[in-house]
Image (cartoon, rainbow, N blue to C red):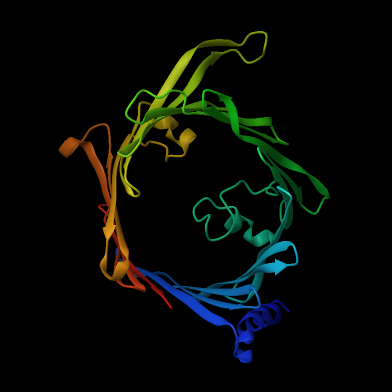
Amino acid sequence: MKRALALCTVLAVLGFSAFGIGTFSGKWETRITLIAPVGLDYTKLTLNYTDFGWTFTGLFSFGSSGLDLVKITAKGAAGPLSITGNAWFDAAPTPAWMGGDLATTLDFAGLALGLTVRHWDKDYAGDFFSATDPTKYWYPDTEPCQTYADQAGMMYILTAKVDPISLKVRFVDCSWGIEFYDASVSLTGLGLCCGITYDASLSINKESGFESLTFTVKDIFSICCGISFDASVTFTTSGKTIDLKAKFAGFADACFTVFADLIKDGGSNSDLYIRGLRVDGWKIKCSLGDCNYVEFVSFLSPDNADLYGYPEGTFEIFTLGFCGPGCCGGQYTVKLGIEFQPSGALFGIKKLSADMSIPIMTNFTITVKFTSTPSLKVGWVFTF
């Protein structure tokens, strides 16, 4: 049955070509590892068919053992509703349903309403909620039904937006009934005074209640020459992050991020003492133009780096990014990185890395990824 379902879905999308109307487009992506060890990482073929205001897409992903993933997407409108649907199928060793989603949105008189329904099979929950490849499926998040062994799951997402308020509420069903999962509310672009605006967002979940609270104040003050500042403070149950962004109009954007947490003693309201502020590290990023930048990350407490989205043990990282016009109207991009350790030869350099994208034709781009571990990956993107 699953084999027939997968085959019928693919044929339904590709079968529209029989009418001889509409337009076709596509993309072919490939990446090969040349060093450590040699092999095919992936090759992906994407086919798009557009007609009657709808676009149908088939994504076919091949690994070293052949076809391993098929994704079918339909996107269009039905009256006032915008609709997007996705379906994923595991193609190896036998076709199997992995999961799918259906999202609808409605905009009316400044009010935007949305409903998304997601389903995933119990054997593929780890794929959909994996932080290693969030673009392949949904997003990096904790699997809601992991406490229920061998259970499939469904998620219902309700959204509403009317300036300046945005609301998102999520419910899950782990085969035991629908229950609340989490919610977030945001206020954007609120006027304070003297041209200063601020944003605020609050997130809660069913496990711990409070999850995070963020305040962002924009254009706090202007010094001169187009220089102004934004400040952001994020409170979580495990720490606090303070961001200070200096904006240099016409020259660069410099962003200063401090990774910090409160030093506390005691465990209850009656005996909780705040002894001070612990600074774990900081990040400085200076953007020069659209895609040229310099970034420096440093941790005083490498063991706490994972609290701020970096691998545990991260000490210092220096990154240089730049771009420029390529041939045939394209644009090349280059990202160079140096990772340091506390001590060692040649300034304590631990790893070098490079990530390059170089267009050689209007519809053909070469990609190169290199690290000194060593690793070398070469690929291409061909559009038609």
Q: Position of residue 182 (x, y in %)?
A: 71, 40
Q: Is residue 36 visible?
A: no
Could you tell me which quadrant the C terminus lies in? bottom left
Name the residue nearer the viewer: 290 or 271. Answer: 290
Q: Is residue 191 visible?
A: yes
Identify the residue at the far left of this view: 346
Q: Position of residue 206 (x, y in %)?
A: 73, 36
- How many numbered circles are shown? 0
Left of 279 or right of it: where is 361?
A: left
Q: Position of residue 89 (x, y in %)?
A: 62, 71
What residue is drawn where x is 63% and y is 60%? Answer: 124
Identify the residue at the far right of this view: 177
In the rendered image, the vertical position of residue 319 relative to residue 30, given as above or below: above
What residue is drawn where x is 61% and y is 73%? Answer: 55
Q: Tell me which corner region of the image, top left, top right, bottom left or bottom right, holds residue 18.
A: bottom right
Q: Tell me which corner region of the image, top left, top right, bottom left or bottom right, holds residue 374.
A: bottom left
Q: Tell me which corner region of the image, top left, top right, bottom left or bottom right, holds residue 344.
A: top left
Name the residue nearer the viewer: 223 or 346. Answer: 223
Name the residue nearer the viewer: 327 or 373. Answer: 327
Could you tell me which quadrant the N terminus lies in? bottom right
What residue is drawn where x is 55% and y is 53%? Answer: 130
In the rendered image, the vertical position of residue 143 relative to residue 74, given as above or below: above
Left of 91 or right of it: where is 227?
A: left
Q: Position of residue 195 (x, y in %)?
A: 51, 27
Name the residue nearer the viewer: 95 or 46. Answer: 46
Left of 296 or right of it: where is 121?
A: right
